[in-house]
Image (cartoon, grey):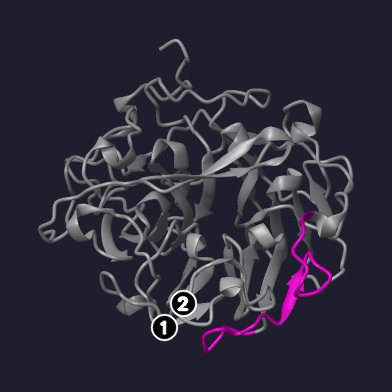
């Protein structure tokens, strides 16, 4: 089943809810499995979300503390797991991320009065405590920040909520808690948003992927309401929102969705152009990117859905994450990309310089050529269907497996030791993006 979310000017994004099956018998112990190419010793560790009762991954008619519907955003750290349960218009919080077990129920819910209520704006109660299709999540200095995408705003709690149904302390992008129109009901400007899907705090700067306005805006620090951004990337000025600025190039976006960076680097997932743009030094003005992943150059934005994929190809990469913790004995920081339409996660042992560097491992597929939803098979712990959001810390990678209505937490992602069943990146030639004539 598919929910279509139209983007401006006739474009459309699909919220894909997949009807999938898996064996009705309980799974055995998890291990390196079924020939999947994995990131070293990477393995599925914890399944958050309801089990597949009767072999289906459909959401239940009434939400619960343990069921999710097309989750899109996730935050995982040493204390908590926080998930945007997007289709249920809420955010779920688990207070002990180190003690999670399969199908654990959440401790708190935001955006709804209780765990059993559904519907946008707190089941129709109002937008002051409600949400509409929340996505990105960040925790910064113990503040919880949520991209309430379809209310065109950012919600900020001054401390991590300790009770359910707690209203945010601050709202960015709207004049008051009851306003929910794109761009504040007017034209594009410096203070409004149009589907802000991704957020990040990198080296003290606060970034918003303002997807519908086809730009990324940033502040030197988390801003206050009505504070204009210090930086606008992707547009000539804050009042324009042209797709690719009229022509695709090294500083244009079609659908920017996520932001990552560390040690001065900045990466932006430009999902609509099937690429990741990178800056060696985080820009403080609207300058060209230094690198591109997923395309062979800065002026190409093609996808190849019917050709074999590769270790460098991307199709709608909705998320990019760099592990905050370097690998033992190295300065390398593994990087993961949610290659969403290819139903896989690509993992590099270190942040690549450009598209000539192939991914080292793939999660969710048997090789770098394949891209089927759940590998065109039953749902298993190591399959994926439209993975959307990522959170990466110390080898633990949380994946919002949106089409399977769950979050999977993988362990030991980016480990040096490679098991014998791992498929290396040269399984498919990786120095080129697949041709559409292949």
Q: Which residue is mark 2?
A: 93
Residue extending farthest top: 437
State the residue position of label 1: 107
Of residues 96 and 133, which is closer to you in this image? 133
Residue at horizontal 10 percent and vertical 58 percent from the top: 25
Q: With 63 as the anchor, is 217 left or right in this view?
A: right
Residue 11, image x and y in percent?
Answer: 65, 35
Place of residue 266 in the rendered image (x, y in percent of width and height, measured from the top left): 65, 50
* Picture quadrant of residue 137: bottom right
- Establish if 217 lies above or below 7: below
| Helix, strand or loop for disc 1 | loop
Percent x, y of residue 259: 62, 52
Where does the magenta region start and end? 159-182
**Horizontal relation, residue 392 to residue 176: left or right:** left
| Tag 1 and tag 2, C-beta contact below 8 Å | yes
Q: Earlier in the sequence, mark 1 or mark 2?
A: 2
Q: Residue at x 41, y 45 (%)?
A: 1
Quadrant for residue 78, please give it: bottom left
As measured in the structure, the alpha-carbon distance from the residue carrying label 1 to the one carrying label 2 is 6 Å
């Amino acid at each position: 089943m598919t929910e279509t979310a139209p983007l401006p000017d006739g474009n459309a994004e699909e919220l894909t809810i997949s009807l999938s099956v898996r064996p009705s018998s309980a799974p055995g112990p998890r291990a390196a499995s079924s020939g999947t190419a994995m990131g070293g010793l990477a393995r599925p560790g914890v399944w958050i979300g309801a089990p597949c009762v009767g072999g289906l991954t459909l959401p239940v008619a009434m939400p619960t503390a343990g069921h999710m519907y097309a989750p899109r955003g996730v935050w995982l750290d040493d204390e908590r797991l926080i998930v945007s349960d997007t289709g249920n218009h809420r955010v779920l919080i688990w207070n002990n991320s180190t003690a999670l077990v399969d199908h654990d129920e959440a401790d708190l819910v935001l955006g709804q009065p209780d765990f059993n209520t559904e519907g946008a704006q707190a089941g129709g109660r109002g937008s002051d405590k409600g949400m509409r299709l929340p996505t990105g999540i960040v925790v910064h200095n113990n503040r919880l920040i949520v991209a309430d995408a379809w209310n065109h705003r950012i919600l900020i709690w001054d401390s991590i909520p300790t009770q359910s149904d707690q209203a945010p302390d601050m709202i960015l992008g709207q004049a008051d808690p009851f306003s929910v129109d794109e761009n504040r009901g007017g034209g594009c400007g410096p203070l409004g948003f149009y589907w802000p899907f991704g957020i990040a705090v990198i080296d003290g700067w606060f970034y918003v992927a303002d997807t519908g306005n086809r730009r990324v805006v940033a502040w030197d620090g988390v801003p206050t309401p009505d504070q204009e951004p210090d930086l606008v990337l992707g547009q000539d000025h804050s009042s324009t929102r042209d797709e690719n600025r009229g022509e695709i190039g090294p500083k244009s976006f079609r659908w920017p969705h996520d932001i990552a960076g560390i040690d001065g680097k900045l990466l932006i997932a430009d999902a609509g152009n099937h690429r990741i743009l990178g800056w060696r030094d985080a820009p403080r003005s609207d300058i060209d990117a230094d690198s591109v992943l997923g395309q062979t150059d800065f002026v190409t934005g093609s996808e190849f859905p019917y050709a074999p994929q590769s270790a460098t190809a991307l199709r709608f990469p909705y998320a990019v994450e760099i592990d905050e913790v370097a690998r033992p004995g190295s300065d390398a920081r593994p990087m993961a990309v949610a290659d969403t339409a290819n139903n896989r996660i690509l993992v590099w042992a270190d942040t690549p310089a450009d598209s000539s560097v192939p991914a080292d491992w793939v999660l969710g597929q048997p090789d770098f050529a394949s891209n089927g939803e759940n590998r065109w098979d039953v749902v298993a712990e190591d399959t994926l269907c439209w993975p959307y959001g990522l959170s990466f810390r110390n080898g633990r990678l949380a994946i919002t497996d949106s089409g399977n209505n769950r979050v999977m937490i993988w362990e030991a992602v980016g480990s040096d030791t490679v098991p014998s069943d791992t498929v290396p990146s040269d399984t498919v030639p990786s120095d080129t993006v697949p041709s559409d004539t292949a």
